[in-house]
Image (cartoon, rainbow, N blue to C red):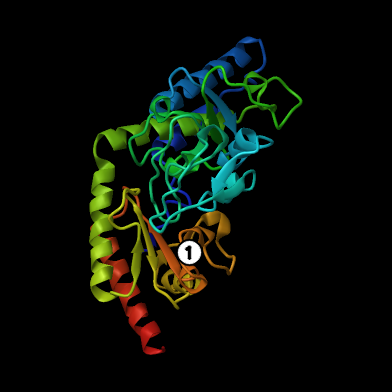
Amino acid sequence: MTPRSYLDWNATAPLRPEAKAAMVAAMEVVGNPSSVHAEGRAAKALMEHARGQIAAALGADGADLVFTSGATEAAALACAGRGLRCAEVEHEAVSAWCAADLAADRAGQVAVSDPPRSALQYANSETGILQTLPEGLAVSDLTQAFGKVPLAFNWLGADMGLVSAHKLGGPKGIGALVIRRGLDITAQIRGGGQEMGRRAGTENLIGIAGFAAAAEAAARDLANGIWDQVAEIRNILESALSAEANETISVGKGAARLPNTLCLVTPGWKGETQVMQMDLAGFAVSAGSACSSGKVKASRVLRAMGFDDTAAASALRVSIGPDTTKDQALRFAEAWTALYRKARARV
């Protein structure tokens, strides 16, 4: 029996062994980081060491790092009540708090006229398209870019950035808001003085330890050129599919984008249908953002880029990672092409 191939890394990356080991070790740490006794101090030391590891991997030395339950909570902490603007290509965790009235062009690029009052993602989770961030930007969602492309928060020019552990091989349920030091924000979760008074609640020490280990490992992979190899496999897959289905649009092809992401639009062949068919064939892929999966509707990202409803409902996202092999990519291409031919024969 042919093993399944996991090609949905933008939804969540497999847990890295380094992260698992760090989490197991953290389970032995008894104390609460807010306690002043020896056990509490040991827990606090572990947490602050992890905070430094993540900041270093993110190029955010000297910035404040506030731990949250994930990037969604970090978005709320960064954006709530600030009257920010964004485009519809943003993840809904951001656009839920902003006036989504900025325009994206057909290439997915967003023009920002008022950076201090705007939010703009660094990389799109559905298309992989990268943005050029303007100086003085209020908030940037760094979730998909962190660990996949070179970036340093201190050089981005943004006041705040959102990150999540499980997108780079850490555990689910832990993330962070990175804040330019000296910037004031209003806590959304109150009742304790944790996280410098910006986020109440006992810190998730086990998740934080796993996040730090994953961030360090991701930084090593990036420095060692692992994601360049991932891009090569993505490009092989893209070429194989394009050769068989010339009507299929590869969104973002030729533009700056994440090295692992392939967004395919085959007008009239619904994305949900493709996801189910490929699942039965042994491949885990998606029709867009994991937070939108299962909803039978057109991609709001593609609609914002000017695609009509039929095309926007016909998207398939393939997102690979360092564990993906050339053989898996070619087997996917073979399976997808066979289904494509059947779908077109019924038209």
Asked whether, in this view, residue 130 is left or right of residue 177, the answer is left
Asked whether, in this view, residue 207 is left or right of residue 252, the answer is right
Could you tell me which residue is drawn at 68 percent across and 27 percent down? Answer: 186
- Amino acid carrying label 1: it is Ala
Q: How many marks?
A: 1
Q: Rate crowding at label 1 as few (under 14), some (14 to 19) or many (20 or more) other CA atoms within 10 Å.
A: many
Asked whether, in this view, residue 61 is left or right of residue 76, the answer is left
Q: Residue 274 placed where, x, y %?
A: 44, 72
Q: Quadrant of residue 76?
A: top right
Q: 178 or 249, which lies in front?
A: 249
Residue 309 visible here: yes
SS class, disc 1: loop
**Mark 1 — residue?**
287
Tell me the quarter of the image containing the C terminus. bottom left
Q: 56 or 27, which lies in front?
A: 56
Q: Residue 122 placed where, x, y %?
A: 43, 41
Could you tell me which residue is drawn at 31 percent across and 52 percent down? Answer: 255
